[in-house]
Image (cartoon, grey):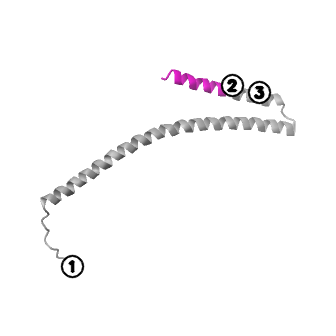
Amino acid sequence: MPTNFAPPVNVSPLIRFGRYSMLIAGISYGLFWQSRYTKKELGLKDFKAREKAARDERLAKEKAIQSAEKVFEESERYGKFTKTIVVERRREVMASQRRSMINDIMKRIRPK
């Protein structure tokens, strides 16, 4: 079932110019803001990566301390371990923390 459409209307050149200029202006506006937001997000991505690394390190330290405390509690409960094992474990954790802090400082002083 064919439909009969009216013949196309001639659009004035001024209207066509206005349409295309608005289209081009909209595309350029979008590109401008997209590039701005992309740069902003990349900066936030770096910041979030640094924050995540610091958070992961802090959580690892807390987990190590909690495991040392758990060993101490088990040693008191069962008498299998002595207090010196817990103290040695805490010393190891503190030494590794110091080493990581020194490495961080050295990286800041002498970037690669």
Residue 78 percent across, percent down from the top left: 86, 39
Type of amino acid at the residue the image marks with label 2: Ala
Type of amino acid at the residue the image marks with label 3: Glu
Mark 2 or 1, which is nearer the eye?
Answer: 2
Q: Read off the magenta span.
A: 95-112
List the residue tagged with mark 3: 88
List the residue tagged with mark 2: 95
In space, the residues marked 3 and 1 are separated at their CA atoms by: 90 Å
Chief secondary structure of the magenta span?
helix
Residue 75 percent across, percent down from the top left: 84, 36
In space, the residues marked 3 and 2 are separated at their CA atoms by: 10 Å
Which of the marked residues, 3 or 2, is nearer the chain's N terminus?
Answer: 3
Q: Quadrant of residue 70?
A: top right
SS for dot 1: loop
Residue ID at (20%, 55%)? 20
Which of the marked residues, 2 or 1, is nearer the chain's N terminus?
Answer: 1
**What quarter of the picture does the N terminus occupy?**
bottom left
Residue 98 percent across, percent down from the top left: 65, 25
Residue situated in front as seen by the camera: 108 or 91: 108
Residue 65 percent across, percent down from the top left: 72, 35
Specify few, some or many for label 3: CA neighbours under 10 Å numbering under 14, 14-19, or 20 or more: few
SS for dot 3: helix
Q: Which dot marks residue 1?
A: 1
